[in-house]
Every structure is written in C-alpha cells, then in structure tokens.
Image: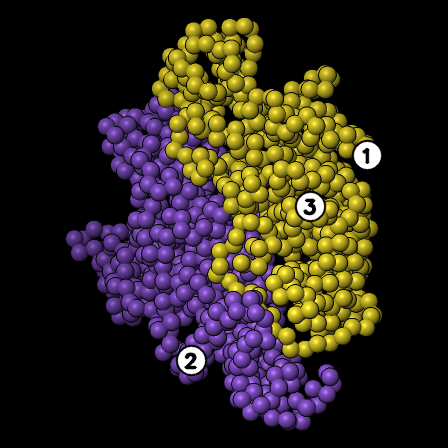
Chain colours: A purple, B yellow
Amino acid sequence: MGQGRIIKVAGPLVVAENLGDAKMFDLVKVGKEGLMGEIIEMRGVRASIQVYEETERLGPGDPVVPTGAPLSVELGPGMLGAVYDGVQRPLDAIEAIAGAFLARGIDAPGLSRDKVWEFTATVSAGDSVSGGDVVGVVQENEVIEHRIMVPPALSGTISTISSGSYTVEQPVGRLRTADGTEHDLIMMQRWPVRIPRPYIRKVAASEPLVTGTRVIDTFFPLVKGGAGCIPGPFGAGKTVTQHQVAKWSNAQIVIFIGCGERGNEMTDVLMEFPELTDPYSGYPLMKRTVLVANTSNMPVAAREASVYTGITMAEYFRDMGYEVVLQADSTSRWAEAMREISGRLEEMPGEEGYPAYLGTRLAAFYERAGKVDCLGGESAPRNGSVSVVGSVSPPGGDLSEPVVQNTLRVVKVFWALQDTLAYQRHFPAIDWLTSYSLFLDKVEPYWFENVDEHFRARRDQAMAILQRESELAEIVRLVGLEALSDEEQILMETAKSLREDFLQQNAFREDDQFSSLAEQNKLLEVILHFHTTAIALAEKGEPLKSIFSAPVREQITRAKYLSAEDIGEYDRILSDIDTQLVAGGPAVAAAAEVNA
Amino acid sequence: MTREYMTTRDIVGPLLLVENVTGVTYGELVELEFPDGTQSFGNVLEVNGDVALVQAFQGTRGSNPSQTKVRFLGRGLELGVSRDMLGRVFDGMGRPRDGGPEIMPEKRVPIYGQAINPMSRDFPDDFIQTGISSIDGLNPLVRGQKLPIFSGSGLPHNELAAQIARQAAVLERSDDPTRVGPPMEGDFAVVFAAMGITFEDADFFMTELRSTSAIERAVLFLNLADDPAVERIATPRMALTAAEYLAFECDMHVLVIYTDMTYYCEALREVSAARKEVPGRRGFPGYLYTDLASLYERAGRIKGKKGSITQVPILSMPDDDKTHPIPDLTGYITEGQIILDRNLHRSGIYPPVAVLPSLSRLKQKGIGAGKTREDHADLSNQLFGAYARGIQAKELAVILGEAALSDTDQAYVHFADSFERLFIQQGKHEDRSVEETLALGWELVALLPRTELKRIKDEYIDRYLPTKPHEYHPGEADTNMTPGIPAGRDGMHNEILGV
C-alpha cells in the first residue's frame, strides 16, 4: 500500500493526496500517530478523510496510510458487558493505556485477543454448512449463549472441527468450499459497519416489546422488530425513557448508543446496570448489554460512525436468533455530526444546513430494524429481530425541524415528550394526545391471546376519555366545572384518574417502575369499571359528591404500587367498587356522612 | 521551531490568510506583530497546502497584509498552571491583570484539554448545600455537575451566582436517615471566567469574593466588554484548564462560574461568519453544540481523584427566549438548568427562580437518606406538584373569580402564594441549612389537606408533618391540564399551564 500526504486540515476533516488505489469509505491511518480516519470523498488524486480523533497539530506533509479495508467492527465472544467508543475501541483498554483522559492514537482491538473461550462444536466433520449456519456455541456469560456462525459469504463442507478452549483468533476448525479451497473457521468475524448484514427475508412482526412503562405498552406499543422515536425538548425525560426501555424491556440483548450525549449519563448507566437485576434472567443487566459511548465532547466523526457500529452489532446478535433492542440517544447529535462533516466538505446544504442526504441516511438506518428469517439454519430455522428506539432532540422542542420530520417518515411509533407535562412532574412526559403507534392492530391478536380479550377495547375507551377531556377542559376553563353534565363531570374525574393513577409512573420507585401487561390490563379495568359504575349510579340520581367520596377511590390511587404477586388484589377492588357504589348504599352513605 | 512570515494575503474580520508557509499544523499558536509594534496571539483554524488561516484573538485592527509579521510557534495554545494562581486575576488569555508578577508555572497545559474517558468518570452524588431553598430543596446542585443559570438582562443572576460561590458547602454523609450530616471541611476553590461582561459586573464579583476573603481561594480570568471579542473563545478554556489542574492534580473541589455564555457564542459566530461557513440557526455555526460540549463536559469527577469540577455557567437568554439556540443547546448538554423569571423578579422575590421549568437532573443521586434526609425527594415532588396546581388554580381564579374555586383549590392558591413568599424568597446573605429548607417545606405542605399529599410516603408524613388541623374536601376534579398545546412564549406561567 502506498503512503499519501496530508495537504489540508480543517477540524475533523483532512484532505490527502496520492493514496494509491484506496477506495471510498476505506479506513486510513492519519499522521505520525496513526489516527483512524475514513475516506468520504474522492476528487482526482485527492481524498477527503473524516478523522475519528482530534486533529490538533496535524499539518500538510504528514503521512496518511491506507489500510485497504472499510471501517468494520469485530464480532464475536466478548462484546457483552463491554463499553466501546464510536469506532469500537474498548474504553476500559484505553483507560488502562492512557489514564482518565482520552489521549489519541491509541489502538485497542474490539475483542480481546488473549481471553480464552470454551467452544462447543454443534456440527461435525463432513457436515455441509452455508453462511449463517451455527457451527458451535460459547456460553459467553450466565445469560447469553453466543452462537458461532459461518460468515455470510462462506459455504462448504466442514473438514475438521473440535470443541475446546480457543481465543477469538484461533481456528476451531476448517471448512472446504465447493472449489476445494480450505478456510480456517475462527470465532471472530469482521463486518463493514455501513453495509447491513444479510438475512433470508424480513417477516412481519406482531409480538409487542414489553417495556413495563404503562403509557408505552398500553397506549403506544412497539413491536419486536419495529422502530420508534422519542422526540422532546431538553428536560422532558428522553434519556430516562430510553433507560427504562433498556432496563425493563423483554428483549434478550440491548445495545445502547450514547451518541453525543452527556458523559455523566454514560457513567450512570455504567454504574447502575451492573447493579440492576434483569427481571427476566435474574442476572445483572450488564450481562445482556453492550454500550457504545461517544459523548458530546468526543470526536465528532466517531459520533457519526457510532450508530453504524451499534446497529451492526445488533444485527449480529439478531443473526444468532436473538431479539435485540438498539437504542440511540440521540439521533439529532448524529445528524449534527453529519451536518458538521458536510459543511467542512463544502457541500450544498439542504434544510437548516443539514446535508441533502439526511433523509436517506436516517431512513437507511431505521430500515436496518426488523424481524427476519436468519441466514443459515436451513435445518433449524430461526428468527431474530432488531427493534430501534431513537431519541431526537429538536431545537427548542420544535417538531417541524428536519431530523424529526425525516424520522417520522420511517418510524411507526412516535412517543412525543412534552415539557409542559414535565413541569407538572407528570412522568413519563409522553403526550397521550399527539403520540401514536401504528402497531396497535398488529399486537391486538397477541393481546387477545396472552393478556385479555378486552384489553384493546379498554385501551380504546381510555383513549377516548382522555381525548374528550381535552375538549371539555376548554369549556371548564371558561365557565367552570359545574357547567358540565353529571356524566361529563364523571368523565373528567376518570380522565384525571387515568392520568394520575395509570399514565404517571415513577421510574425511580421500585414498586412502580415496572408494570406487566397483566397488571396494566387490570389497572385499566379497575379505573374504567369505576367510571361505568359511577355513570350508571349518577343516572339513578345519586349525587356526585357521594360517588366521588367512595373509599375505594383511595385503593384505586394506590393500585399501581401493587406488586405482580398481588394481582388478585385488583379483583378485590373491582368487587369493592360494586359493593360501595350502590344507590344510597351503606358504604357511600357512611362515607358521605364521615366527610360531611 | 518558530517560523516567521510576512506573507499575509487577506485580512477579513478577525482572520488572516497567510501564504507560502511550511510546517504549519492545525491548531498551532501564532504570534502576530502589527506594523506599529503591537503584539497579539492567534491560532491556526485551517491549513491548506501552503496557506494557513489564522484567527487573531485580539482582533486585526492596525494590521496590514504587507507589514504584519506572523510567527508560528510550533505549539498549541497553552496555559502555565500552578497553585500560585489562587488569589490572582488574569486577562482572557491568561496573562496577569492585577499588576502582580508572572506565574512560575509548574507545567504548561494545552487549553483545549482532552475528553474524560466515560469509564473513568465517577458519578456525581455529593449534595452541595448552597443555602438557597429553591435550589437545595427542589433542584439541588451536586458536586461534579454542570448546572447553568438561564437568566435575562436585568435579572439578579450575578447576585445568585455570587451567593452560591460564597455559601456552597458539602455535607458529611450521615448514618441516620432522619438526620442531615454536618458541613464537611475540604479544600475548595472558585474559578471565575468573565466573557464580555461589564466592568461593574466583574467588579461586583471581585467585591463579593473579597468580602468573605474567598478571593484567596479564587482564580479570575477577565475578558470584559471592551476587551477583544475573539479572545473570549479562549477565556473559558483558560479557566477550565486552571480548574482541571486544581481539581485533578491539587485535589481541590473547584466551582467554576462563567458568565456570560451568550457573548462567548457570539464571538464564535463572528469567526464563523468571517470564514463564510454555512450557518445553522440564527446564524450560529452548525458545530455550536459540539463546541459548547467541549466546555461543559469538562465538569465532573474522576475515579481515584479527590477533587472535582462543578460548573455554574450563566447565560442571558435574548428576549427571555428559552428556545434561542444558546440556552437550547446548553440545556441539552448540561445536567439541568436554573431558570430565573421576570415576573417573580417584578414581584420583588429574590432569588426569582422559576421553580417549575428549572431542573436538576442529578437530583435523584444527590439527595435522600445518608446524603440529605430520607424525606427530601418525596417532599420536593410534593412541593413541585402542589405549586404547579396552585399556579393553575390562580389562573382559574383570574377568569372565574376566587369565590368560584373549590375549597381545595383555594388551599392550593394559598399554598402557592406562601410558597413564593416564604420558600423561594430569601435574603441575599441568608444561608439556610438544608434542615431549615426541609422544615419550611413541611410547614408549607401542612397548608394542604393531608389527603392531597399523595406523593409522600405515609411514614414520612407521620414523622415530619407539623400537627395542624385542616379541612377535608373530597371530590374536586382538576381540569386544567391538557397536553399537546404548544407552549406560549409570553411568560413562564402561561407555559406551565399550556395555554
């Protein structure tokens, strides 16, 4: 490979010439320290390179060495529990070399070369295999079995394979292709981050991704393999919502990308996840998690790469047949990184200075989500899925800006965060009137089978009540509550109960942070049962005051704190509603007397 | 290593384009000598072949293409650091401004700094008692946090920042969840950076610091309104470099106050415009977020180091507009914000902290049993909720008349008024301990029926609520909360109500 020379340095962008036969998106080593960079534009002998590290003190004449390969990630045992920067350098290894501050020019492989894994072969010599077939497994930790697959492009006959202890680079066996060449099989694969990993076909997803957050699961559900976005102004709770999904969702693998966000937030995840227990496996959450941390003050080009690094890892776990959630916080910072690089390339800007290809890039990224029939496994077909949840940080909370608008075109779930709700300390501050999910009809059969046949109807009724509340609120503001009919006043009261007793959920309170679908259904049933019963009673002429002072209302307020084992308690509340809300009934009368 | 050229081709605003240079590197420090002999510093913004683009920190007045000497110094912009900086006043480029001698530096450090490895960060969870109820009680500051003050022209942000600097203390951990630990002894320092503020403002801070002899543990970097604008780009970095040295090499707990971020951003915009870069919103460069992050993210704690850096940047929002790019991008990077409100200020309340839109993201980590007191989080949630409800009720009373309000709503109105007058309002030299703040909070929630205290655990209510009779009026619906309506920009209270 030839060696080129720098001719221009402008921030993270370096222009070099005479790079030989280097190609677009090839990785290069820049300067005497060998900083990582990627070719993003070529004009004649000149190549523009975005550099993944600080370019301070680089100058014309400094060397640039092409590597001949595109930016790739290393995939294999050892990723779970790791914390990487945007180009998959393990941050703990960098810390060991350079200390607390990120020095540049440090090279550390994504997967440890020394660590020995216990490999168990699942095929034998003579078996014919093709790309994606599982040839063996490594129990990576207590939770996840890492399936070692044949690289996508390879197929042939296993000539040797043996279980035993190997590092990721040592051959576990050999494979002979149809044309007779022999290939070593190693546990590690490399894959270029900008190219989606192949699969047989995409399939429609219908199973909800349960997050334990009531407003999401009941009102605006996401499916395993779907894509959703969380836009909101600062302070509305994007990051807490993302963390909730990372902690409690029923996915098997979580990839969390901190893309241009706060350093302390990553530290929070780093300190909390090893302590928290995965509700499904009983082991620390970190065992199923990979973190990609490229904080806001780390190099901007690596931020651009970080979402691709993350989604490639997600696809790799998907190919093993796992259900993966990828979270990108925040995609706006990624878009801004594109804008910054685009500006330095002196490209003609599109809307608000963003490059004209912003929409295409966003769509291509979200389209890497999905549920698929995995490559390989002809004998034992398997499905895997990648769900993507991206947060968006629109300037000034303005949802008409390009990143939000381009995202909404491709995602099917929209969780709109409102700062007005956050100021009320209504958390999660997901606005129930503007948010939507296009997966409702998809998950309905699942709800019908696994939750309750009436769940969808309850959800729709509750939504209608909330919608009606917003209309009535205008009237109440002008003429007061008394101007409403009895039925409308009950509706206002039920809507308040839905907001406070159902939608509001405290992410930091142990008895509230996770709610199963069964609990959500029961809680909704209780609130709506009170509503229906109250209306029936009011029609019989019972004064509202006595209805509203039924002692069971206190139980409804506290119902969300019931634990999963106490699910029978909801039925008791339901029957209490029936016994207390009887026209002139003893409970109501007694309660009314106490309160008079 | 020094190379001198007199080959300047163009001078545009604060920028010089120098031709026929060799060996120049990106970010290199440059010394400029103008025809009249004045000297100035600059750095390399871009180098393209044999052409270097230099930004002159002290401006280009008095320079001309043919006679200006440009010396490339072969190193980046650095600050000489030493413990002797304490008690000293420097200009925006780190040169003594107080008439004292030059510092004998322990070492010279590049001012652009390096990012802290997220793995090496230690999570900020030590409560800082500022002695200000609206902060300690509701939006507490934590050691290693970056918590800006969003203000506007004419609001007392300087007084508030100075009060924080004077009163800040860290509490000892307490084994008893019902008791607050005593203030801790420790090695504290204040680093103050002024960017484009007036002499009066800077003088105010110096006087405040002197009055408590805090000046002996302070380092000041002053770039005043009549100092060169482009120099402001270097000033906060000088301050943060000094802070990092004091925190991570001298084991001190450093509070960095810098003001005013708006002028800093405008200096960035000036350079960006001169470079003819594609502007983002309101003409600010597209990389404003990244640039601000390179300042704010220098706050924090590091595992294995005793010291810490806590930042309180001040920015004045143009036209009190929170969606202006500067406060907006700041809010996305910092861990919360303290917002000052003009209406409260007009009603004579100091500090005029708009409690509801203010936020401390690290609150959950810094308060509770051991750190402050077990009931702190619940009480503060309740105060927030009740105040929000009280504000709504007041709005309702404006339309319908006070008499039309339910008894509960009237209790909330009474609560909201008392809350502003007793809890938010305090003296400029009044240092309330966190127990006093909590006690005040409990007295205020006692104005409400006990059944309304839904956000506080029963055991805390039993333990802390002052015994006092109250009336119970069940059954009122609250009707004022409707999401989905974009926030108005005319006044904080309208925003809260979503009308």
Q: Residues within 10 Å of mark 2 (few under 14, many from 20)?
A: few
Q: In this orientation, does residue A113 appear?
A: no
Asked whether the residues under marks 1 and 3 belong to the same chain, the reply is yes
Report the Cα–Cα distance between label 2 and label 3.
50 Å
> Which numbered dot is residue B345?
3
> x%, y% of residue A423?
59, 57
> x%, y% of residue B378?
69, 63
Q: Please tell me which of labels 1 and 3 falls first in the chain.
A: 1
- Do callouts 1 and 2 mark residues in contact (Cβ within 8 Å)? no
The chain letter under disc 1 is B
Report the front residue among B154 and A531: B154
Q: Is residue A36 left or right of residue A504?
A: left
Q: Amino acid at mark 3?
A: His
Residue at left 42%, top 58%? A229
> x%, y% of residue A526?
54, 82
Q: Quadrant of the C terminus of chain A?
A: bottom right
> Which numbered dot is residue A145?
none
The chain letter under disc 3 is B
Q: Which residue is mark 2?
A: A457
Residue at left 43%, top 68%? A220
Q: Which residue is mark 1?
A: B212
- Residue B322, picture quadrant: top right
Asked whether the residues under marks 1 and 2 belong to the same chain, the reply is no
Report the Cα–Cα distance between label 1 and label 3.
26 Å
The chain letter under disc 2 is A
Q: Is residue A437 left or right of residue A542?
A: left
- Circle 1 SS class: loop
Residue at left 33%, top 69%? A205
- Do callouts 2 and 3 mark residues in contact (Cβ within 8 Å)? no
- Circle 2 SS class: helix
Q: In this orientation, does residue A202 appear?
A: yes
Residue extending furthest toward the left: A179
